[in-house]
Image (tube, grey):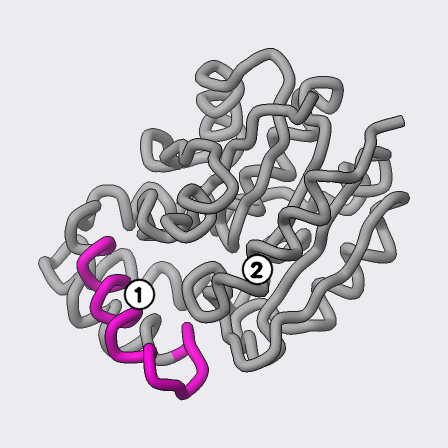
Amino acid sequence: MTSPLIYLPGMMCDDRLFAPQVRDLGGSVLPITSADTVADLAAAVLAAAPPRFALAGLSMGGIVAMEVVRQSTDRVTHLALLDTNPLAEDEGVKAHRARQMASARAGQLEQVMRAEMKPRYLVAGPNRAGILDLCMDMALTLGPDVFIRQSRALRDRPDQCDTLRAFSGPALVLCGRNDTLCPLSRHELMRDLLPNATLEIMEHAGHLPTLEQSAATNAALSRWLEKPTS
């Protein structure tokens, strides 16, 4: 019997990030918007989740997913980490986040998203403009308070390399070939840390393969979900 599937979206994204996956594979999307630490966000996921479940997280969602595993390894049957990073925040990025949070607090969230974040999300392609518009709508719907809470959580996140070493269930590590935010080298690291992992690279995709290459992403997720647990 297949475990219930939970998706955790990336920073300033909502359930629409996984719309193609929910449509074809089922499952439900849980928000990660209510707290400003990764530990508290993971605890909220565990409080809302069924007793045992498969877990897929993209970007910040992957970071929270790793903390879910750290807090309750026995409840996660399958783990999928998409376009994410197991390492603690770099000091230079922390300083940059402080400037972004100040701008969002001053009512400039749209400018931050447009100038600093959206241009780094996607590769060129026929659907790029529509996906970028969706990203902006998701971000503005969530608003500056969520942006600040999520920025703090990312800034202060722990290294999760030991967490990955300890997870023995079926794991999928997936990324867009052209992801500049979370490059391929990070995913090769996660593949090597996880005892039972497969690395899948989505061609012609950047940071959001769930939307950029939804069919290929769904196929990879389907293969992952079919893998038996030990």
Q: Secondary structure at mark 2?
A: helix
Q: Which residues are magenta?
A: 120-139
Image quarter in which the N terminus is found: top right
Residue found 82% across the figure and 50% down from its top = 197
Q: What residue is drawn where x is 83% and y is 29%?
A: 229
Determine if the magenta segment contains residue 217.
no
Query: What residue would you read off at disc 1?
Result: 99
- Residue occupying image coordinates x 89% and y 26%: 230
Left or right for 108, reference 223:
left
The label number, if any, that marks residue 217 in the structure image? 2
Front residue of this view, candidates 68 and 17: 17
206 w.r.t. 36: above or below: below
On the picture, is 76 further left or further right than 15? right
Instruction: Indicate which disc, 2 or 1, sits on the residue closer to the N terminus.
Output: 1
The structure residue drawn at horizontal position 70% and vertical position 55%, both measured from the top left corner, is: 173
In this rendering, is residue 226 above or below 206?
above
Residue 40 image label:
none
Q: Amino acid at mark 2?
A: Thr
Residue type beneath disc 1 = Arg
Across and down, in percent, residue 42 comes to 52, 28
Mark 2–mark 1 distance (CA, rounded to whole Å): 34 Å
Relative to the observer, which residue lies in front, 183 or 148?
A: 183
